[in-house]
Amino acid sequence: MISTVRQIKFCVALIGLVAGSVFHAAPVLGAILTRQEFSGDFTRVSVSPFLENIVPDKSEYSGFVAYSDDGTLSDWEVNVNDLNLNLNADSS
């Protein structure tokens, strides 16, 4: 149970990091951006000893953010392959 809670905290922190870096690229005055896709790799640098067997050393992530014409966030999705995470606007 404790390792599950720690895994969830790690996953939430990871998603927060990815989502924060993508959402920071929100449309600015004069820019027209309706959908932005992103993907990449991450490598585990350090992790609690409790999570070493749960969190993969490397993984890939992908997703997208979509904005309405007035610049408000209308849809998003984040996938982390080796953690079996698939989060989207409906799951929050």
Image (cartoon, rainbow, N blue to C red):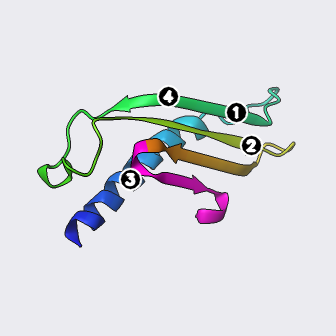
The answer to which of marks 1 and 3 sits earlier in the sequence is 3
Amino acid type of the residue that numbered disc 1 sits on in the rendered structure? Gln
Q: What separation in Å lies between label 1 and label 4 (alpha carbons)?
A: 14 Å
Disc 2 residue type (three-letter): Ala
* Circle 3/circle 4 CB separation < 8 Å: no
**Three-letter residue code for mark 3:** Cys
Front residue of 8 and 27: 8
Per the rendering, the mark at residue 7 is none
- Residue 35 is a magenta residue: no
User: Which of pointers 2 and 1 lies earlier in the amino acid sequence?
Assistant: 1
In the image, 66 versus 24, the foreground residue is: 66
- Residue 44 locus on image (x, y percent): 28, 35
Q: Is residue 40 left or right of residue 4?
A: right
> Gap in Å between the C-alphas at discs 4 and 2?
18 Å
Q: Which class describes the residues within 10 Å of circle 4: few (<14), some (14-19), or many (20+)?
A: few
Kindly identify which residue carries mark 3. Answer: 11
Q: Where on the picture, by quarter, is residue 43? A: top left
Q: Which range of residues does the magenta coloring cover?
A: 82-92
Q: Residue at 83% of width from left, 46% of height from top? A: 68
Per the image, the residue denoted by label 2 is 66
From the viewer's perspective, is residue 31 above or below residue 26?
Answer: above
Q: Residue 26's spot in the image, x, y percent? A: 67, 36
Which amino acid lies under the numbered mark 4 shown in the image of this protein? Gly
> Crowding at label 2, few (<14), some or many (≥20) Cα neighbours within 10 Å?
some
Label 4, on which residue?
40
Secondary structure of residue under mark 2: strand
Q: Which badge, 4 or 2, is on the more N-terminal residue?
A: 4
Instruction: Give the distance between the C-alpha atoms of the residues marked 3 and 4, in whole angstroms.
Output: 16 Å
